[in-house]
Amino acid sequence: MFKKVLIANRGEIALRINRACRELGVKTVAIFSEPDRESLHVRHADEAFCVGPGPAARSYLSIPNIISTALITNCDAVHPGYGFLAENARFAQICADHGLTFIGPTPEVIGTMGDKATAKRVMREAKIETTPGTDILESVDKARRAAKDLGYPVLLKATAGGGGKGMRVVTGPDELERAFNNAQNEAESSFKDGRLYMEKLIVSPRHIEVQVLGDNFGNIVILGERDCSVQKPSHQKLIEEAPAANLAEKTRKSLYAMALRAAQAVHYTNAGTLEFLVSGDRAYFMEMNTRIQVEHPVTEMVYNIDLVKEQIRIAAGEALGYTQDDLRPRGHAIECRINAEDARNNFAPAAGTLTNVVFPGGPGIRVDTHIYSGGTVPPFYDSMLAKIVAFGETREAAIARMERALRETVIEGVNTTIQQCLEVLATDAFTSGHYAIDFLPGLLRQADAA
Amino acid sequence: MPGNNVVQRVRSLVVAFLDTDLVRLRIERDGGHVELRRRASSRPATADSPEPQAQAAAPENVDAIKSDLVGIFRFSRPLPVTGEMVDSDRELAYVEALGIRNPVRSMGAGRLVSVCCDDGQPVEYGQTLFEIQRV
């Protein structure tokens, strides 16, 4: 096992990784930017180093300062969390070059699967159905020709992307140039990689993803699926659940089989997620995230497994120690993302001081967060403040518990998505489990019209 | 009132300064000056900070020379000594990061009023390494 791990991230996921390390008896080193000096992930780590000013490009994306921190503190591994450098193959390679174990898949696999356009090509070669689309589009003109061939509506996506960043729906040729430039700029500033590709837009699909875990001995297991179809108009997820409601058993088995075939095709190691668009009984591979996901707690709760600890154990060279037959999901889990955003103003992010913070508790509730009363929300980063996760023996019980937990939650000082989550939970579409990715945008349009 | 006007202008300056990546901004006018500096050890000022003037003022004309990277601090030779006068481009130390020596310079002439790190000490971004009183 590792002696000391550098956590190359911030916020709740840095705290989550710190907790896993603590329970494994591994020391931790936190990195932080100047505005994050008082953040909880800094306080809870054994050591902490400031790596730059507020803008992520000069702090959480500063590879030289992060690697230097790991080396001068004698770390033997780096956990990248999600976002920032988590899917940067170059960073993973630089870690390896400096004798640091990158807690994730190999740089080669990140390069193949983390690059969304390349991943789709590899999947097609492995006979896995993908959404019709293109490779990298070097110019607006090429995008225009591709859109004409695919037929509008189309989706522009950042090849290094995730979290809905660098993604735009284009419904007609008039919107293409502006959407291309906006997506490219957003991808460049978020991932330092502005390359885009295009997909045919599948109308009203469900977003269902499959969790995989592979060790260095060729063992790969599937840890069920998550339904992440409650998405904001920007395609960022707001509510996730495991398992997916009303998913035909045949489709579920097909998704697991495709995920296993995909992971085996690239000899996948560590935690990863394959995202699919499901329309009727058809499932299309969309992309693979070669990292831990934001919504991993719902899987942890139904499988009673600590995915972050598993990541660390696998990276340290341990075998999984169980097979697919040993894994049995139980019950239902739902996660609500509590963001510092104004849901009534196109989810505009908010920053400021949190004057009062009270989180829920009680049976079946888990809260992953880094915020506290008196803390600040800097304007530089993702607006997520907390993840509230509710577990129940049934989906109905989980929904009731989540509603109770959201009503117990108090966050004052910034706008949050709590009320929006409550509104979603109260709809017939959500309670019946019949919803797709256009559900929340439709709900918002109805609210605006009213 | 003139006083309110000055406070308003400094406040505007702080807001504009925070919008940049600048570490230090000094404006001289009519024999007076205002200097804004980012301090790694404190939260950045915001438009509604209670004491923008206090953060903006640099006491006794002392500049903090800070590390702009993470690494191991080493003194250069000759060893800098507290109280000595340093010239405008003196290499006082270096921060070793990823095997590269990154020089730390005096950034202007003055009297070295404090040496804030020990040889061989790990230093972080924004950490004060030296303080120099400008003359």
Image: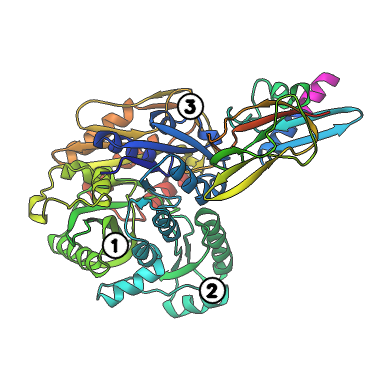
Is residue A52 in the magenta section? no
> At label 2, which amino acid type do we have?
Glu
Image quarter for residue A88?
Answer: bottom left
**Which amino acid is tagged 3?**
Gly
Q: What chain letter is assigned to the residue under label 3?
A: A
Q: Quadrant of residue A302?
A: top left
Residue A256, visible in the rendered structure: yes
Is residue B5 covered in magenta?
A: yes
Q: Which residues are magenta?
A: B1-9
Query: Which numbered dot is residue A138?
Result: 2
- Residue A97 or residue A282, whichever sits in front: A97
- Label 1 sits on a secondary structure element that is strand
Q: Which chain letter goes with mark 2? A: A
* Residues indicated by labels 2 and 3 sit on the same polypeptide chain: yes
3D distance between C-alphas at marks 1 and 3? 37 Å
Of the two numbered discs 1 and 3 in the rendering, the one whose residue sits closer to the viewer: 3
Neighbours of disc 2 within 10 Å: few (<14), some (14-19), many (20+): few
Q: CA distance from mark 1 to mark 2?
A: 26 Å
- Left or right position of B8 against A367: right
Q: Is residue A200 left or right of residue A58?
A: left
Find disc 1 in the rendering and name its residue. A276
Mark 1 vs 3, N-terminal side: 1
Left or right side of A425 for A341: right
Q: In x, y percent, where is residue A331? A: 14, 42
Amino acid type at circle 1 is Phe
Q: Determine which of the numbered discs, if any, sits on residue A375 in the image.
A: 3
In the rendering, at what x and y percent does residue A243 appear? 19, 50
> Helix or strand or loop: what does disc 2 sit on?
loop
Which numbered disc flags the more N-terminal residue, 1 or 2? Answer: 2
- Give the position of the C terminus of chain A as an image quadrant: top left
